[in-house]
Amino acid sequence: MEHKCPHCGSEDTCLIPQAKHPASTLGGVAGAAIGLASIASGARVGATLGVAAGPLGVLTGGVAGAVISALMGGSAGYALGNIVGEQVDRRILRNHLCRECGAIFKPGDTPQLPGTVS
């Protein structure tokens, strides 16, 4: 949903994402760190599943379980950071651009009277 420009009233506005990308990256790194912190449980599950293949299966399963744990944590963190960053962009930051007059505003800004300076 686009918003009306409080300066000229135009509906030709767009959102400039400023928080979405950093929040996604931060969430991905944090999620991967949490996934790496739980590496022991992922390795244990992988090693247990690899027992049927012998010692090499235990080693391979342990490493695969640890890697999968980190990847799942990273992707979950990235997705959560993406959602949070998008909401910050849409509701908090002054990063909506009017394509008609070039004004930058945030939703809820009070309309300006012509000739006044904000």
Image (cartoon, helix red, strand yellow):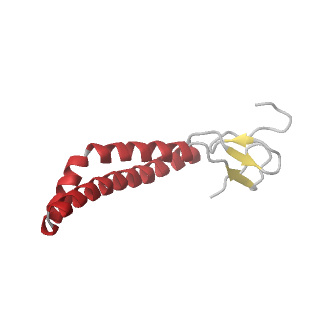
* Residue drawn at x 20%, y 61% as measured from the top left: 56
Report the side of 18 relative to 62 (left or right). Answer: right
Residue 26 image point, x, y percent: 46, 42
Q: Is residue 35 above or below residue 112?
A: below
Report the side of 94 relative to 57 (left or right). Answer: right
* Residue drawn at x 72%, y 41% as measured from the top left: 104
Corner quadrant of residue 62:
bottom left
Report the side of 86 relative to 17 (left or right). Answer: left
- Farthest right residue? 115
Report the side of 70 relative to 9 (left or right). Answer: left
* Residue drawn at x 84%, y 39% as measured from the top left: 114
Quarter containing the C terminus: top right
Residue 10 image point, x, y percent: 78, 53
Corner quadrant of residue 2:
bottom right
Residue 109 image point, x, y percent: 66, 40
* Residue drawn at x 21%, y 47% as measured from the top left: 40
Between 2 and 39, the one nearer to me in the picture: 39
Quarter containing the N terminus: bottom right
